[in-house]
Amino acid sequence: MSEIKKIAVMTGGGDCPGLNAVIRAVTKTATMKYGLEVVGIKHGYRGLYLGGSEFVNLTYDNVKNIISKGGTILFSSNKDNLFDYTYEDENGNICHGDVSDVGIKNLKDNNIDALIVIGGDGTLTSGRDFSRKGVKVIGVPKTIDNDLAATETTFGFDTAVANAVDAIDKLKTTAESHSRIIVVEAMGRYAGFLALAMGIGGAADAILIPEIEYDINKVAECLKNNIKRGKEHAIVVVAEGAKPKGGEIFVSKVVEDSPDPIRLGGIAKVVADQLEKLVGLEARATILGHVQRGGSPTANDRILSTRYGAYAVELLMQGKFGNMVTLDGNSMSYESLENVIGQNKAVDPEGELVKIAEATGVSFGR
Amino acid sequence: MSEIKKIAVMTGGGDCPGLNAVIRAVTKTATMKYGLEVVGIKHGYRGLYLGGSEFVNLTYDNVKNIISKGGTILFSSNKDNLFDYTYEDENGNICHGDVSDVGIKNLKDNNIDALIVIGGDGTLTSGRDFSRKGVKVIGVPKTIDNDLAATETTFGFDTAVANAVDAIDKLKTTAESHSRIIVVEAMGRYAGFLALAMGIGGAADAILIPEIEYDINKVAECLKNNIKRGKEHAIVVVAEGAKPKGGEIFVSKVVEDSPDPIRLGGIAKVVADQLEKLVGLEARATILGHVQRGGSPTANDRILSTRYGAYAVELLMQGKFGNMVTLDGNSMSYESLENVIGQNKAVDPEGELVKIAEATGVSFGR
Amino acid sequence: MSEIKKIAVMTGGGDCPGLNAVIRAVTKTATMKYGLEVVGIKHGYRGLYLGGSEFVNLTYDNVKNIISKGGTILFSSNKDNLFDYTYEDENGNICHGDVSDVGIKNLKDNNIDALIVIGGDGTLTSGRDFSRKGVKVIGVPKTIDNDLAATETTFGFDTAVANAVDAIDKLKTTAESHSRIIVVEAMGRYAGFLALAMGIGGAADAILIPEIEYDINKVAECLKNNIKRGKEHAIVVVAEGAKPKGGEIFVSKVVEDSPDPIRLGGIAKVVADQLEKLVGLEARATILGHVQRGGSPTANDRILSTRYGAYAVELLMQGKFGNMVTLDGNSMSYESLENVIGQNKAVDPEGELVKIAEATGVSFGR
Amino acid sequence: MSEIKKIAVMTGGGDCPGLNAVIRAVTKTATMKYGLEVVGIKHGYRGLYLGGSEFVNLTYDNVKNIISKGGTILFSSNKDNLFDYTYEDENGNICHGDVSDVGIKNLKDNNIDALIVIGGDGTLTSGRDFSRKGVKVIGVPKTIDNDLAATETTFGFDTAVANAVDAIDKLKTTAESHSRIIVVEAMGRYAGFLALAMGIGGAADAILIPEIEYDINKVAECLKNNIKRGKEHAIVVVAEGAKPKGGEIFVSKVVEDSPDPIRLGGIAKVVADQLEKLVGLEARATILGHVQRGGSPTANDRILSTRYGAYAVELLMQGKFGNMVTLDGNSMSYESLENVIGQNKAVDPEGELVKIAEATGVSFGR
């Protein structure tokens, strides 16, 4: 029998539409259905380490208006790993090491019986490590790229696609009025799910993704054929990590030195310049950037987030610690945190979605 | 081996976001991948009967900008059943009978080898009947209520939910500022999928659906508890066909005489009046009406529609006539038109989505 | 020289997009520019009467995220007039009378030197009356109908027009797909500004407003001419208070007994029924209702609200008490509360906007 | 008395939301009110030079669904000046010179009596020059920057502000969740109207515009004060042409060589890097780019465009050739094309809008 009376919830890594809806569902399910107390830990693992005012009570009142709010009311922090942490000690010296026991002590001092961690690979890895040390942990996956193997879909993806398609709709009016090619760079260094979805939804003429090496001449040929059919403009969607056939991975390489797409111009600029020459229409590059992951979650993501959050509490109450909530087909399920870390999925180059895109005339440059 | 060279496509029944995206995918796949000719039949079966200028060629150019457009460029008509048709003959007399052979002749006269019909139960029933008479038919299901048993999800539903949640977000500011209960009436005479999804996504306090008889006192109790928790306003979503426990089905009855919700006030008004008395807050009713099914399809629906449309052509080319395209899990599949007519599904009162809604504090009045 | 150190702000009457942006601008200008303290009075004049916990401090932190939020964080109440108030005394008896001195005492007890009241005619009338009794009052006008004579435009109007046009865009896809007339009922019992703006912005075929008596036959004739030009659908916008020529004022009369448009069907239903018969297309009525005034204010309204709020504080600091902030041309100005009450404006039937609408083919039924 | 029977309309320069609404109003007013014929000239002055299939008839049917469509159905071209034109002659030689007479001949050959040109400074300059040569010309101003001295506001500006504020709303969730400064670069090389409006509407902490030289230390100081007040994130809006005090004009200089903001990083990147160091929060730069000027026009811009278009035809019919339509206060008016070219306006550094922004805590870096 579960003796859980008080639980904590935290968010780690980059923000993602739906985080607040998860926090809300966790809080409501825990307090209203099970009569638990809920603590929100601010700033992810940093807050777990710091304790004190980083631990805040979450009640019905705190979460009553947040389902539609982007971001996370608990704030987030990147790359804070308590098992390998850099901090200042009481003498002001910079120290480095495993401070996970401080986190565990903070949980105990606050009488917290279990912990729900919402985050990506890094956040969940630490979740697994805390679980190994005996903390009752449930993970909730978060990846805007939707590339987590263990689960069908993650919240935030639908909103990112919607935001991107909305932007493409706007860009199309310019492309059409000026007979231009507009190359839109999408998030996705390793997986093309987002580029693929926004390309199909945005009626792109070509979609370049990491999973399918592209030949720029094939892309150009497709656009030229469309011009013959009377369409004197084009939208091309390029994932950050798209790779030219035989060539080196443009963006990944540059990203090492300098992670800021604005500084670099990114692959979108390269593709635009090439297409301008090959196709003979003016071409422009656009990088959607953070706009893509911001704003109010779609209805779809609000529902999915609510399911993830509520189910995380159910797992806790069933004593299924050390697991991550997953979406299996269209049902909530779970998988051991031991098995999910680093298990990514990629777009299947011969899968139905790519095939259907090609059937409707989309070029992948192959 | 398929000898299909020219196909026709038509839309029947109420409009639904995504119809144009299906038409586009059919046209693009047929012309670009298979080199077929495509004819659009205007005004559904009425156009099939009338022939002539109701048959229009569909090319790349006709469909190049329609993925984001609501409604149907082929127009639609309701309740035109050529197997039981009312028409005027050449002498101006009103006649009644089976004119399906006229439709078949029009297809032959236009050298149309196969027909894709996009529509709901009525449209698909006729599709089945034409199939029985030897026409090569593929059906594409359309139901904004998402209550078709043979398929996981239909296009248009996601947009309807999104539109409704957007409206609820707007209504909530009024509810909150004036400490009011706002009762929102959703489409759904027989199934509560839409009300359930928009209720969860819109963070409703209560959701009343046809599948779960409600006790208005239970709903009121829930709202009063929320007031104690500090939430002095409420959103209640009511499906048109929601039924009070032991009582008669309010709307369905009235609907017989007069299908116009505006004239009736609808069940939303009844529920609002009851809750105002029981809860002690001002209550208002709102009927979303056609706004719910209008407008540009969501990115999600554009993708789903594209899959339905492209796959319909694939089925045709594979010679799998007499079938309807379905979504099975997350893959496109098909099912015989003989098996799908009248096979509706309903919300499972003990299913995961209802349970999760209840876990997060939503009352279904039970 | 002004000796104002602490001010209060309150909102009265129906909610309106931009109220929070006004509250924010008042608070920021008062605290950041002038170092004042700001008190928010909840629930309008009722809160002024009740005092105590209805008075809350407003700081930078309270208002930092509210510019985009619809409604009012201070809540509102309708029809609470302290000069003619119904209340329960300490013995539980229902009493009735002038309790304005209680309000004044509450201001004094809280050391509040001046009061900014944001509201419509009723709210401003009380504001004037408090001003007559020596309270330092500044009024900020609020009317979603934009019918206040003293000021060019009021906040909320732009958002209401935007919401309505967005709804019309959605309704148009249904109208077009089904060759229907859709009659959209807009707020506006006495003035047609909203109907006129949403009609022009929504490309309506006809606009019926209180200021121009309409002949339904003229409207029908216009729609029939458009059908001849190839447009087999129509959007007709009707203000609640539109009047048939020679006939009685349909809605106004009914409204006496029963103010709820949903129950009545409203004038939209009447017009739809008439047009269906006269024009020969199916017609449907839609009442936009509260969706129209809800949601996040447009960028335009956020700016206008910020100007109203900031300027209200400037007037206070300049000692110009007893005035209402106005927009004069494109500049902020003010006018005595003594002169503005009950001074409404109406659409000029021969004004530029009506003339331009007519030039572009819109029928006003005359 | 006017003998105008047939008019032409064309669009030049960058696309702008509302162009189609102007074309629609021109066409409807000309055909429905005055019974004129209307010709649309495609691709601006290039189409005027080419004639033939570049001249298309515009009827009720062509414009019936375009009010909500971004871009221009007549397409546009940049920098085509027939008075100084580069073209290929019949022998394939590249020639250069004044070909305005070819344009005039094309008008005559098509029996076009008058020409409405919609565009920015370049387009209107040619309009003036054609007017000087006797062509009956009316100009309609188009500038997304709203910096035309002769008119109060131009269409497209409201939509650009709305799109930008929508983007800022999205970016804010990331800024807040990660305690970041986000620097948003707005269009506006010479005028800060857009940056100012989107900054106020988006609740920016600082707004840097060409008209007010900024001291980055002052901006940093403002953000640090806000952090003390509890706001650990910031939005800073920077116009492309913003100038550091005493420093050189960063962007304008770079723009000479290479007009693409994505390649450059732009001033937003410079400001973000500086603020990150000075304030001690992570800072990111975002360039809104073409998304800002794309998409469906706001209701407001649709109305304004309709007024511009309808009034242009009125001027023609009144014989007031050689003039440009203007908005004077809130009324349509006109001004000679001889007087408006190159007459730009700038944000008044001591004007009401800047003052109100400062009153509500916005820093302009001064």
Image (cartoon, coloured by chain):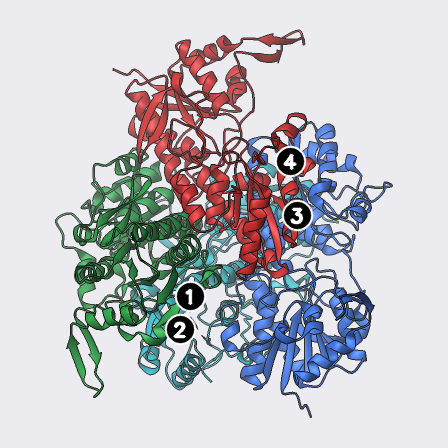
Chain colours: A cyan, B blue, C red, D green
SS state under label 4: helix
The residue under label 1 is A172
> Are dots 3 and 4 on a single chain?
no
Residue where numbered disc 4 is placed: C261
Toward the viewer: B344 or B316?
Answer: B316
Q: Amino acid at mark 4?
A: Pro
Residue positioned 56% across, 80% down in the render: A359
Tell me the distance, in whole angstroms, between the alpha carbons under discs 1 and 2.
Answer: 8 Å
- Label 2 or label 4, whichever lies nearer to me, is 4
Residue named by callout 2: A233
Q: Evaluate whether label 4 is on the same chain as label 1.
A: no
Let me know if residue A270 appears in the view.
no
Asked if marks 2 and 3 fall on the same chain, the answer is: no
- Tell me how far mark 3 sits from mark 4, CA to CA: 24 Å
Residue B351: horizontal and vertical position, in percent?
76, 55
- Disc 2 residue type? His
Find the residue positioned furthest to the left.
Answer: D246
Badge 1 local density, few (<14 within 10 Å), some, or many (20+)? many
Label 1 vs 2, first from the N-terminus: 1
- Specify the label residue B199 is tagged with: 3
**Which callout, 3 or 4, points to the residue nearer the camera?**
4
In the image, residue A51 sits, relative to residue C51, either above or below, namely below
Task: Work out how far the residue at label 4 is from the one at label 1, CA to CA, in angstroms.
Answer: 41 Å
